[in-house]
Amino acid sequence: MCTEAVDVLRPLALELEQGYGLGSMTCSIYDTAWVSCISKPSDNGSRQWLFVSSFRSLLDSQSADGGWHWPPQRDPEDAAGTILSSLAALFAIKQHVNNPLQLIRLQDEANDRWSRGILYMSESLRGPWRLSGYSVGFEILVPALLELLETEGAVFAFPGKRELFLRRDSRLSRVLVGQQLDKVPSTLLHSVEALYGDMRFSFDTLRDCLVNGSLMGSPSATAAFLMRCKEWDGSAEAYLRLTLSNGAGNGSGEVPSAYPSTNFELIWVASILLKAGCIEQDPNAHLILESFDKWIPEGGLVGFSPGIQPDVDDSANASIVLSLLGKPGLSRQMREQFETATHFETYRNESSGSLSANCSLLLALLLDLQQDPGAVSAIEKVSKYLASKWFNACGPVKDKWVGSAIAQPIIVDKANPV
């Protein structure tokens, strides 16, 4: 394994030397669709589609059945990713059908793909898919896209639609939209495209929320910001161009679901290799560990990328690395920020708990116990929470951050002390 660790660390070290941060998250049809919707005034005043390669990629990713499948289907009843991707793709295509701009040559193809996609969604939404176990953001993003498509004359009726919209309303009621999001830290920033169709909400208020040109490292949220803000933002455009060129799409037009994810990739790789005793044997290790100290605020908590809202999952893995390096962890800070009566939140004020995040948290608390002996009660609380979720589940345990039931034993194994 230590030999193979060299192959893992070398590309990370190279990317860190370039100074752009790290980002290898899988490309997403959903984010590609949103980015393809951006148009920009040219020097002569006419608008032009900004990312033509993204729209071409979106058209090419439509399946023969008319849908956009992401990730590849395993269970027809657990189709959240495909539903979200297909709705976003239809919205993007309709924007190009309505306003071909410089892509008039694609008009006939776009119309054909729109028709096929509508037929696919009409059948799929009436199928056996279920509301339970959907992915993060599903309950606010799908209703938003359904409303946007309804304004284009595409109305879908399906069982559970009313319940889905009620869930969306309940979720958004917890967000102080009336007070600007730049003054209320919220994970909604990562999915703020859910408010794209709400003309009461001003996207211009989000300008101060940009971190290196992005809204919480989200290409789709940043795209919606550019589409709705009154004054063009060059930093947001530059961020999206960097994402397309340096992200997992490598200039193909495909867009990752988040970029960059420096802390996430660096922390998780470092924690795994440190636990295996490999990282110090690699010549790239010093650069990784030096960068680790650079990206993580002293005594602070971290998000998946520098400047992004902290979360307990990345903070827990950062704490694990610090403990394995013989340094004080982040146990006390995590207890102050994320502890609730029954478990630890991934983000402040989240709507539901996460099994995987609490597994990482438990290991972090155990490794940092000498530095933070007051964490004993928290360890007991999290252990009870995980045991309850595991033994009371009807069938495979579902986690909102991990879609595969196969991954659940691996997640729980993370909580075993090193």
Image (cartoon, rainbow, N blue to C red):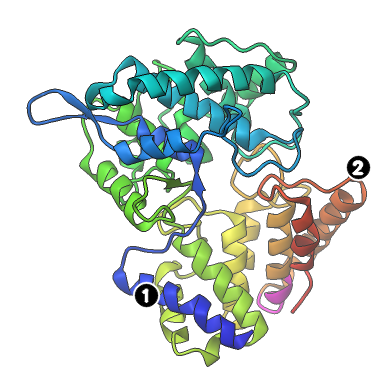
Is residue 182 visible in the rendered structure shown here? Answer: no
Q: Earlier in the sequence, mark 1 or mark 2?
A: 1
Quarter of the figure with residue 91: top left
Assign a secondary structure to mark 2.
loop
Q: Which mark is residue 394?
A: 2
The N terminus is located in which quarter?
bottom right
Q: Nearer the viewer, mark 1 or mark 2?
A: 1
Tell me if I can see residue 60 in this picture. Answer: yes
Q: Amino acid at mark 2?
A: Cys
Q: Quadrant of residue 179?
A: top left
* Residue at the (42%, 68%) spot, across then down: 295
> Is 370 contained in the magenta span?
yes
Residue 307: name its quadrant.
bottom left
Q: Please give left or right for residue 73 compared with residue 101 in the image.
A: right
Taking depth in this image into account, of 272 and 44 the one nearest to the observer is: 44
How far is the residue under mark 1 from the one under mark 2?
A: 45 Å
Horizontal and vertical percent position of residue 322: 57, 77
**Closer to the camera in the image, 274 or 374:** 274
- Name the residue rendered at 76%, 47% in the picture: 341
Q: Which residues are magenta?
A: 366-371
Please state which of residues 373 and 151 is positioned toward the viewer in this rendering.
151
Q: Which residue is mark 1?
A: 14
